[in-house]
């Protein structure tokens, strides 16, 4: 019993928030010498709330987690929040969220900190994935790392010389808005032919539905019975694993596009390891194999020497864990 009490005494607690384009997820996290554990979890759909109501929901749930932890004698060090857009890390201000309307120039840190009464830190969600994977996950022990989130949007986080690199204006790592086709379709960011416009999950589904409506042969036709709007990424993955040629082709194209983007990243940054996570990455080898192949075909041979391209250890939990890790990193600086 005494040993257990000593372990709890050395544990550190933080609240992590992963603000996604589809869901907002929160967790009370316990960090110890053994790693990280999710003690409490909560989530709600992003689009069910306007901006102010969503902030209120965050406050309610953060205060609840804080109270439950305090009741058990554990002090929460702070709140970390990962957001899918451009963030001024120093001020905790959200410049804009590409896939979520209504979030321009919002001083989120100030708004929340005044209400929850503990330190609040706000950063780009892909940065926090990189922090989670480099400190506790698949990139632990590597000094030069690129992390990619493949979901509603495509984000990138950079670890250079063992430290998170945000860039001069906190805008580094926007891999999803690297150009695949300068004359391509308009992206929600205002650019043309961005990678996200080809490999973000909504666009993968749009392209698959478009081809099915035009008569593409697939076992998905029987499953969907012409209700193509019910198509999901999981259905595409399962069909591909059953050797459905159409679904295999869709994932092959996604992997090829991501491989082209990452080959440029490899030539530019020469990382030791690339970690890929997010909902789209749940397709596993269906997407990882073409990514690895294309990177090795297109990037300089010297840049690929000893390069590892691996899936995220934490997968959908990476953003939350990274948000908690951000709290400890910042609080323990002081």
Image: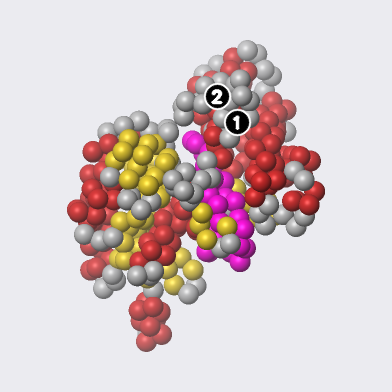
Residue farthest to the top?
214
Q: Is residue 134 magenta?
A: yes
Q: Which residue is mark 2?
A: 192
- In the image, 57: left or right of 3? left
**Between residues 166 and 227, which one lies in front from this camera angle?**
166
Residue 314 in sight in this render = no
- In the image, 182: left or right of 72? right
Q: Which residue does the image show at 61% across and 20% down from the upper left?
A: 183
Q: Are marks 2 and 1 in contact (CB under 8 Å)?
A: yes
Q: Is residue 18 above or below residue 49?
A: below
SS class of the residue under badge 1?
loop
> Where on the picture, by quarter, is residue 45?
top left
Q: Considering the image in quadrants, where does the C terminus appear? A: bottom left
- In the image, 307: left or right of 180? right
Q: Write the start and end of the magenta stretch as one range.
A: 133-159
User: Gap between marks 2 and 1, in whole Å?
Assistant: 7 Å
- In the image, 211: left or right of 165? right
Q: Which residue is mark 1?
A: 179
Q: Is residue 129 magenta?
A: no
Residue 226 in sight in this render = yes
């Amino acid at each position: 019993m005494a040993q257990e009490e000593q372990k709890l005494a050395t544990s550190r607690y933080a609240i992590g928030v992963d603000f996604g384009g589809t869901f907002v997820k929160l967790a009370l996290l316990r960090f110890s010498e053994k790693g990280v554990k999710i003690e409490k979890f909560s989530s709600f759909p992003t689009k069910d709330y306007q901006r102010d109501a969503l902030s209120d929901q965050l406050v309610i749930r953060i205060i609840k987690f804080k109270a439950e932890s305090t009741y058990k004698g554990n002090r929460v060090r702070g709140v970390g929040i990962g957001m899918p857009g451009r963030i001024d890390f120093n001020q905790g201000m959200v410049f804009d969220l590409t896939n979520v309307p209504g979030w321009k120039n919002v001083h989120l840190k100030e708004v929340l900190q005044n209400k929850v009464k503990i330190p609040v830190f706000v950063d780009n969600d892909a940065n926090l994935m990189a922090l989670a994977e480099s400190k506790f996950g698949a990139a632990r022990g590597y000094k030069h790392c690129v992390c990619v989130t493949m979901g509603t949007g495509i984000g990138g986080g950079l670890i250079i010389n063992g430290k998170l690199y945000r860039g001069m204006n906190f805008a580094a790592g926007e891999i999803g808005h690297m150009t695949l086709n300068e004359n391509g379709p308009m992206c929600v960011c205002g650019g043309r032919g961005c990678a996200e416009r080809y490999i973000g999950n909504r666009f993968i589904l749009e392209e698959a539905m478009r081809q099915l409506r035009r008569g593409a042969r697939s076992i998905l036709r029987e499953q969907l019975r012409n209700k193509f709007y019910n198509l999901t990424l999981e259905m595409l993955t399962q069909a591909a694993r059953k050797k459905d040629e159409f679904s295999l082709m869709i994932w092959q194209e996604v992997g090829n596009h991501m491989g082209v983007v990452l080959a440029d990243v490899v030539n530019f940054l020469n990382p030791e390891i690339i970690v890929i996570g997010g909902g789209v990455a749940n397709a596993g080898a269906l997407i990882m194999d073409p990514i690895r192949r294309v990177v090795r075909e297109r990037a300089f041979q010297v840049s690929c020497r000893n390069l590892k391209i691996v899936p995220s250890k934490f997968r959908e939990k990476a953003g939350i864990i990274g948000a908690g890790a951000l709290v400890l990193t910042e609080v323990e600086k002081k």
